[in-house]
Image (cartoon, rainbow, N blue to C red):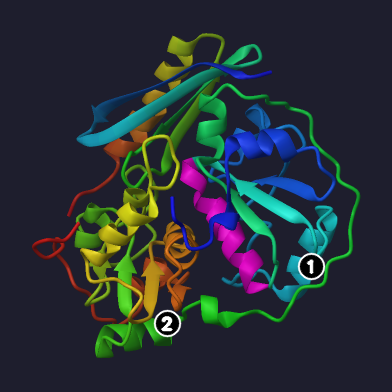
Amino acid sequence: MKAEHYRERRLEVAGWPLRLTSYKIGDLFHCHADNVSPGANVARASAPTQEEAERRALEKAQERLASTRRR
Amino acid sequence: MNYAHPEVLVTTEWVEQHRQQDHVRLVEVDVDSNAFHEGHIPGAIAWAWNSQLCDTTRRDILSREAFEQLMSQSGIDNDTTVVLYGDSNNWFAAWAFWQMKIYGHQDARILNGGRKKWLAEGRDLTREEAHPKPAHYRAANADLSLRAFLPQAQSASREQCAALVDVRSPQEFSGEILAPPGLPETCQRGGHIPGARNIPWSKACNDDGTFKSADQLRALYAAEGVDNSRPVIAYCRIGERSSHTWFVLRYLLGYAQVTNYDGSWTEWGNLVGAPVEKGAAAAGQA
């Protein structure tokens, strides 16, 4: 078993940079979203397709990043 | 790469070639412990940073007895070559490495590039859990010269007797946010320890997760006045990102006196009456 279809893409969510990393292991695609700098994991999701795994991780990340308060 | 201690880093190729040897134990230490269960390097075991690499009653690292128990259960004896790797560019792998050095383990190494590089290169993975035969481990007394506590951080701030390196993001350093974006706030006040320089941990890494060259690293820290001429105290929010920087300064650059202040901002930023500096890094700062 290997990680296949490995890809990273960056986007901006709620004013914060976000990196989505996704890949397939076995039958499932996994995606994790991190906040680039500092690089902490914000959300993770798994799904049968890469697009769905990314969509679910992004949805969770949006919710969490939107709650970050700037002072 | 001209690192001071190149023996503490291994490549993905090295792991591929040596992972089945009896004296080698692979340990994955992730920020997100679910990652291990997606698939991991065949033969690897996992340590959970928030339950197995800390005292779960009081805020502290493992006791010597608990450390010995963890090593023994993990099939690690005093002569085992332990290769640590994990997600987020080895944040908690570095945290585990730091504790292993505190308790005197000789042959601890870090997989350069961590989990990210292993996956990106399409190397073998498994979901099968390894069950190493328990071993007998005897830890040394804790070497606290690798760890800074609050009084040392306070002295460094007040007397400038050591360089304080804040490895958090610029927004955490300035006080704009109280925790990394998307994570719960864990302190009462934002900002940084007065006198600290802001050199985010991630500046020590390349895009593929590997460490930058010794020359690049030396230049990065020297540009902020951090060199081997005086002690260095690294800190972040809870001590794991700063253990990454501690590893870089102590083992890749060979600085003699580097400590990890694992109390970090969750201690300082919650202290009643502690001085706090706010605002962005000074000109020329990261």
Question: Disc 2: which chain?
Answer: B
- Image position of B73 (left or right of A11): right
Q: Mark number for residue B150? A: 2
Q: Give the image location of residue B72, x and y in percent.
A: 84, 60
Q: Quick check: B136 above or below B42?
A: below
As drawn, A2 above or below B101: above
Q: Nearer the viewer, residue B180 or B205?
A: B205
The kind of residue tagged 2 is Leu
Left or right of A9, for residue A30: right
| Number of the label disc, if any, that sits on residue B68 | 1
Q: Which residues are magenta?
A: B88-103
Chain to which the residue tagged by mark 1 belongs: B
Amino acid tagged 1: Glu
Q: Residue furthest front?
A: B2
**Which is more foreground, mark 2 or mark 1?**
1
On the rendered image, what quadrant is the C terminus of chain B found in? Answer: bottom left
Q: Residue at x 25, y 66 (%)?
A: B222
In the rendering, at what x and y percent does residue B85 appear?
A: 59, 45
